[in-house]
Image (cartoon, grey):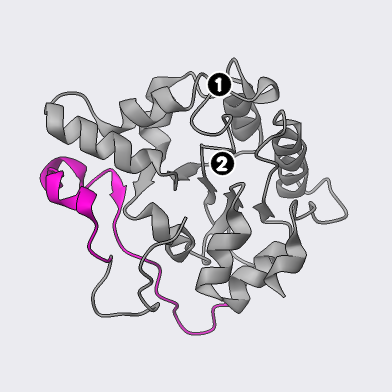
């Protein structure tokens, strides 16, 4: 998917989006990740280091082609009936950030109806891969601009990124720190036509890594060569 690109560090951020005109800002301020990440000095310090202070584990995740069949179809079989949620919780993620285009659908519908919340619409589009609505609402934030999703990854957190189009969005940012994250196994560019077993395998490897049980890094699934 293409969209206007705004350079990282631009004084105007996020870029104007048609969806933002219909939002109710007071209701969404506590739900939406509005600012793109701006690097601080020495961004590589502590990334992946055993001596680094504990950082919250954050999963940035897509929905369409990642949790469900394109285009917002049925849940991938291996992830259905809450199995994705279970794997995420076993991996010890403390926060989730949804970067899917579903965020825009949810915000538009919730704002237009003036009832419910964007989270409810986004959760419905997960098609049962996540079933605990209270847990989802408490742990998940929505990215402000899915078209610029990779720019919202905070590299000073213990971040992981799950998206069938991950490398497309990472290329648009062109960050050496994010590229290093790919090599560390922080990124899963899953098969959009798969059954979701690749996602579960990656989450299992992440869980082992975070528990200190894995001598090697989890694989960066997907065509990593596209970053070169």
**Horizontal side of residue 200 vs 157, given as left or right:** right
**Horizontal side of residue 27 vs 145, given as left or right:** left
Q: CA distance from mark 2 to mark 1?
A: 25 Å
- Is residue 67 a member of the stretch shown in magenta? no
* Residue 120, percent from left and from top: 32, 25
The kind of secondary structure element at disc 2 is: loop
Q: Earlier along the polypeptide chain: callout 2 or callout 1?
A: 1
Q: Which residue is mark 1?
A: 74
**Horizontal side of residue 177 vs 150, given as left or right:** right
When asked about the image quadrant of residue 10, the answer is bottom left
Q: Nearer the viewer, mark 2 or mark 1?
A: 1
* Residue pictured at 47% horizontal, 42% vertical: 96
Tell me, yes or no, if residue 44 can be seen here.
Answer: no
* Residue pictured at 23% horizontal, 75% vertical: 12
- Furthest residue to the top? 81
* Residue 87, percent from left and from top: 65, 30
Q: Quadrant of the C terminus?
A: bottom right
Q: Is residue 17 above or below residue 100?
A: below
Q: Which mark is residue 93?
A: 2
Give the magenta range. 15-43
The dominant secondary structure in magenta is: loop
């Amino acid at each position: 998917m293409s969209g206007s690109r705004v350079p990282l560090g631009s004084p105007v951020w996020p870029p104007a989006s048609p969806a933002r005109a219909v939002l109710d800002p007071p209701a969404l301020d506590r739900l939406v990740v509005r600012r793109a990440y701006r690097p601080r000095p020495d961004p590589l310090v502590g990334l992946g280091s055993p001596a680094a202070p504990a950082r919250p584990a954050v999963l940035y995740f897509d929905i369409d082609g990642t949790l469900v069949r394109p285009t917002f179809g049925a849940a991938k079989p291996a992830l259905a009936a809450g199995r994705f949620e279970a794997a995420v919780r076993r991996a010890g993620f403390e926060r989730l950030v949804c970067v899917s285009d579903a965020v825009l659908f949810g915000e538009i519908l919730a704002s237009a109806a003036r009832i419910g919340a964007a989270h409810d619409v986004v959760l419905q589009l997960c098609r049962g891969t996540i079933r605990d609505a209270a847990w989802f609402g408490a742990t998940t934030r929505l990215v402000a601009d899915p078209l610029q999703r990779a720019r919202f990854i905070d590299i000073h957190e213990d971040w992981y990124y799950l998206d069938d189009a991950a490398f497309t969005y990472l290329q648009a940012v062109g960050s050496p720190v994010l590229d290093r994250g790919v090599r560390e196994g922080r990124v899963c560019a899953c098969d959009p036509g798969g059954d979701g077993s690749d996602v579960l395998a990656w989450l299992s490897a992440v869980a082992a890594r975070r528990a200190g049980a894995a001598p090697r890094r989890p694989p960066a699934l997907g065509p990593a060569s596209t970053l070169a």
